[in-house]
Image (cartoon, grey):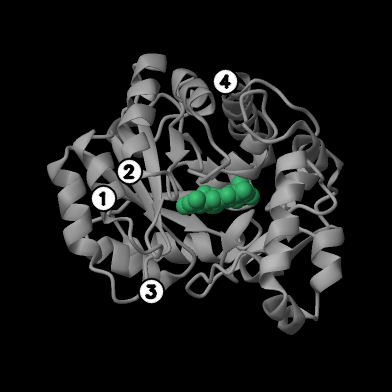
Amino acid sequence: MIHTPVCDLLQIRHPVMLGGMAGNTSVPLVAAVSNAGGLGTLGIARTPAEQIPKDIGAIREATKHPFGVNFLLFLGGRGPAIDAALTARPPVFSAAWARTDQDLKSLFGRAHDAGSKVMYMVGTVPEALRAKAAGADVIVAQGTEGGGHVGWMASMTVLPMIVDAVGSTPVVAAGGIADGRGLAAALALGAQGALLGTRFLATRESPLHPNFKQAVLDSDGHDTVLTEIPDVARDNVWPGAMARALRNEFIERWAGREWELRARQPEAAAALQKAQESGDAKNASLLIGQDAGLIRDIPPAGELVERIVAEAEAVLKGRLPKLLR
Ligand SMILES: Cc1cc2nc3c(=O)[nH]c(=O)nc-3n(C[C@H](O)[C@H](O)[C@H](O)COP(=O)(O)O)c2cc1C
């Protein structure tokens, strides 16, 4: 069995984590991952404050194991939501994408006072050092291969750079990992575990529309692109992030014409909303990583956690030792 210090720190059996994807995670998905021994995380970046205690209560009903909740810190007006989350004392408080002027130290201190461990996701070495200085317990090093909002550095380089930079603080790898080979590679690069987003979108418990799950399976991984188009269409600017999305008709329509998209934003937002709701995979914004090219089925999330750790163990115990003379 693969066991790393982060398993002890977070009190989980397997070093496999669900990315807290706002709007793309659900209580059943979080519980399935945690019940399988991984760390389920609910993305609550946009969840109304009054709903948060209910969601956390529902997770506690569905699993006795640790779980996390995730915030996108740059979003304004989320003070009451963060208060609500911390009052519910989640085992893990996970966050990403702070603005440069935000005070991480006091926020992480409040999370610690609530009894939560703090996980913070970064895509650069300076951000990792900032999170360490603010007292993060775990740093998630996210590579540009990943789905959703990402930076520019690939996991293969940014992960070991962050591991070297933060010393004793545990690092978890994210971006481009969809199977046990990816977990084994992340461990080899110095990570203590892996956090997966895109892979968990295509699971039974994932709240995604069935057409969108199928789009993940249909993607060959070459058809994603880093783009601002989904954020421009939603009039939602992120601090220094692009989104990795499936290059579908929605993206093709606006690529190179972001200026026009800005002018026609309300109309584009309405069309996007309709496509999201109706499961129109050609005209929706589908944030997925390059690792979609590795995803071929829609298993139960718990089974997936078990499969990933078994595959990683087979690589570490079976294939790699045979390479040594
Ligand atoms: C649809 C989608 C939504 C996401 N939303 C969030 C979010 O709300 N907060 C966050 O910290 N990360 C978010 N992420 C990033 C994931 O936490 C993770 O870093 C990424 O999915 C890892 O790459 P992978 O998709 O290749 O596994 C999102 C990713 C996806 C695919």
Task: Give residue 49's position: percent from left, percent from top.
Answer: 32, 43
- Residue 293 on image: x %, y %: 80, 46
The answer to whether mark 2 and mark 4 are in CB contact below 8 A is no
Q: Which numbered marker is on residue 126? A: 3
Q: Nearer the viewer, mark 2 or mark 4?
A: 2
C-alpha separation, residue under disc 3 versus residue under disc 1: 29 Å
Q: Amino acid at mark 2?
A: Ala
The disc placed on residue 148 is: none
Which numbered disc flags the more N-terminal residue, 3 or 2?
2
Label whose residue precedes the other's in the sequence (2 or 4)? 2
Determine if residue 158 is in view.
yes
Name the mark nearer the viewer: 3 or 2. 2
The answer to which of marks 4 and 3 sits earlier in the sequence is 3
Would you say 179 lies left or right of 27 here?
A: right
- Identify the residue shown where x is 67% and y is 64%: 230
Q: Could you tell me residue 152's position as x and y percent?
A: 60, 71
Measured in 3D between alpha carbons, the distance from the residue under mark 3 to the one under mark 2, in whole angstroms, is 31 Å
Q: Amino acid at mark 3?
A: Pro
- Residue labelled 4 has its Cβ within 8 Å of some atom of ligand 1: no
Residue ID for mark 4: 302
Amino acid type, residue under disc 1 in the picture? Pro
Q: Which residue is mark 1?
A: 80
Q: Residue flagged by tag 4: what amino acid is it? A: Gly
Q: Earlier in the sequence, mark 1 or mark 2?
A: 2
Label 2 sits on residue: 49
- Asked if the residue at tag 2 contacts the one at tag 1, i.e. Cβ–Cβ closer than 8 Å, the answer is yes
Please tell me how crowded label 1 is: few (under 14), some (14-19), or many (20+) other residues with Cα within 10 Å. few
Name the residue: 66% across, 68% down. 266
Tell me the distance, in whole angstroms, between the alpha carbons under discs 2 and 4: 29 Å
How many residues crowd mark 3 within 10 Å: few (<14), some (14–19), many (20+)?
few
Q: CA distance from mark 1 to mark 2?
A: 6 Å
Q: Nearer the viewer, residue 182 or 231?
A: 231
